[in-house]
Amino acid sequence: MSGNIAPLIQSFQQYAESFAEPGKELAFAHRLKLEHTMEVLDFAENIMAREKITDPRQIFTGQLTALFHDLARFRQYRQYRTFRDNAEFNHGHQAADMLEKEHWLDSVPADIREAVIAAVRIHNARELPDDLPAFALFPARLVRDADKLSIYHVVLDYFQHREAYQKDPAVSLELPETPEIDRALIARIRQGKSGDYRQLTSVNSFLINLFSWVYDLNFTASCRMAAEQNIYPQIRKLLPPDDELDELCCLACQHAENAVKKL
Ligand SMILES: [Fe+2]
């Protein structure tokens, strides 16, 4: 039996829109999260279609995880006016708690509900925990890929329409635009590691770290989409001329394209 995602999309959209102040449009930051969520759902569905996943229960689990992964972002922004997680507010944990305690998944079979909640809880962890139950592995991997693909779009859009974003500090990068290039970060990425977010202290480092995400993509279809969308050359263009960065970009493109060839 497959679940019907349409009414849940509608409830989610109504919930997001309810954060608009009376008589006003939804705040830019909230609108961005709503659009990001719909894009993550779209990417998740696209990845599943390309991976030829046909089990309706698996598809429904993937759709639900994508739809609800950032559920807590709306409260987070209203309360803190930022999307930076801190000790009190981890948006993955908060969204999972909301799904457990509120009505969202009442109509969903218990085993699917459990998988969705477990995957949402850790979707933003640096790495998937070793003790993640096997039933949550697929939706967790799926939503992490779809999230990365959408964040690539958001970042590229940010640099193309900065005036709009900079109206609200919550959605700007809040990082200094210094010219230095972090060689240690490049070396880490060449070893297939990513940078710690706390160490990404400039716009350049933030952008350089985006190359590392290619090594973290779980599905061949996700690599294919990153390659088709020309993501890495576009990121490269946002950084200064530098041989090591050219090479890093080439390695990311090769990695994505090699995955594509295996299809
Ligand atoms: Fe997200």
Image: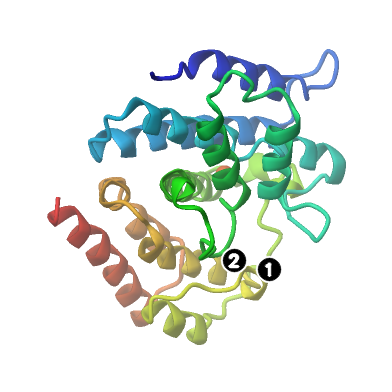
Q: Nearer the viewer, residue 207 or 180?
A: 207
Mark 2 residue crowding within 10 angstroms, few (<14) / some (14–19) / many (20+): many
The figure's colour scheme reads rainbow
Quadrant position of residue 257? bottom left
Q: Are marks 1 and 2 in contact (CB under 8 Å)?
A: yes
Whole-percent x and y of residue 258? 18, 62
In the shown orientation, is residue 172 left or right of residue 78? left
At x 59% / y 66%, what residue is drawn? 203
Task: Tell which quarter ligand 1 is in.
Answer: top right
| Residue holding disc 1 | 176
Crowding around mark 1 (Cα neighbors within 10 Å: few <14, some 14 to 19, many 20+) is few
Say whether mark 2 is within 8 Å of ligand 1.
no
Query: Residue 170: x and y, percent?
Result: 74, 48
Instruction: Give the CA distance from mark 1 to mark 2.
Output: 6 Å
Query: Quick check: 251 above or below 7?
Result: below
User: Which secondary structure lies at badge 1?
Assistant: loop
Indicate the amino acid at tag 2: Val
Residue 242 in the image, given as x and y percentages of width and height: 39, 79
Q: Residue 253: where, in percent of width, then height?
A: 27, 63
Q: Which residue is mark 2?
A: 203
Q: Residue at x 69, y 25 (%)?
A: 16
Q: Is residue 53 above or below residue 242?
A: above
Q: In the rendered image of this protein, does residue 33 appear above or below residue 22? A: below
Q: Mark number for residue 54?
A: none
Position of the N terminus, as image quadrant, is top left
Q: Is residue 187 left or right of residue 123?
A: left
